[in-house]
Image (cartoon, rainbow, N blue to C red):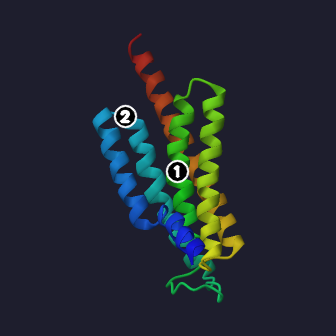
Amino acid sequence: PTLTARMALVSAFASTVAILGLSIAASAFLLWKRRWYELLALAAVVPGGVLLNFFLKIAFARARPAWGDVDLIGFSFPSGHTMGATLFYGLLGAYFVFGAKSWWSRAITVALVFMIICAVGFSRIYLGAHYFSDVVAAFAAGAAWLAICLTAVETLRRHRRSSARLAGL
């Protein structure tokens, strides 16, 4: 029972309510700091990833495992908690990595984010909400969506910077 309670707590860090609340807090902070490109990335990554997860669940329509103690509605594949953790904590980690000055702090950040995502994924399997493949698919889809969004926002930032330089000539 103690381990199950701990796994439920770990899982809660990537619940819809937690990711939504953390995203709103991060958005307010980025808005206050006038970090427009980071705000744009957050606005693309999290809601876009939620939609991607929703459509993947509908496309695959995989039933949840029968062994779990949790009574959940909806499809199993891919894991929404794992995708949410990959998207939000992955984006947060990317912000820290981009701003870090040493390789050591970048390595620690990547390791911590990876451990958080793995812990959430493991908790979902432990609780019987998902199969291992649901968790791996959510991580892969979330990481791909995160990479696409970060690349798009960085491309936009560079394009605007070069356009501004050309306009100033």
CA–CA distance in space, label 1 to label 2 = 18 Å
C-beta proximity under 8 Å, tags 1 and 2: no
Above or below: residue 131 compared with residue 95: below
Please, which residue is most extreme toward the front here? 2
Local crowd size for mark 1, using a 10 Å CA cut-off: few (<14), some (14–19), many (≥20): many
Taking depth in this image into account, of 47 and 119 the one nearest to the observer is: 119
Q: Which residue is mark 1?
A: 89
Q: Amino acid at mark 2?
A: Arg
Q: Secondary structure at mark 1?
A: helix
Task: Residue at 68% x, 76% y: name it.
Answer: 131
Viewer-side label of 1, 2: 1
In this rendering, would 127 be left or right of 39? Answer: right
Q: Which mark is residue 43?
A: none
Local crowd size for mark 2, using a 10 Å CA cut-off: few (<14), some (14–19), many (≥20): few
Quarter of the figure that contains the C terminus:
top left
Residue 39 occupies which quadrant of the picture? Answer: top left
User: Where residue 112 sits: x, y (%)?
Assistant: 61, 46
Task: Residue at 55% x, 78% y: name it.
Answer: 58
Question: Which of the marked residues, 1 or 2, is nearer the chain's N terminus?
Answer: 2
Please, which residue is most extreme toward the left here? 32
Task: Residue at 60% x, 82% y: name it.
Answer: 61
Above or below: residue 38 compared with residue 137: above
Q: Secondary structure at mark 2?
A: loop
User: Where residue 14 sits: x, y (%)?
Assistant: 49, 62
Taking depth in this image into account, of 121 and 155 the one nearest to the observer is: 121
Quarter of the figure that contains the N terminus:
bottom right
Q: Which residue is mark 2?
A: 35
Please, which residue is most extreme toward the bottom here? 66
Above or below: residue 54 compared with residue 140: below
Taking depth in this image into account, of 69 and 138 the one nearest to the observer is: 69
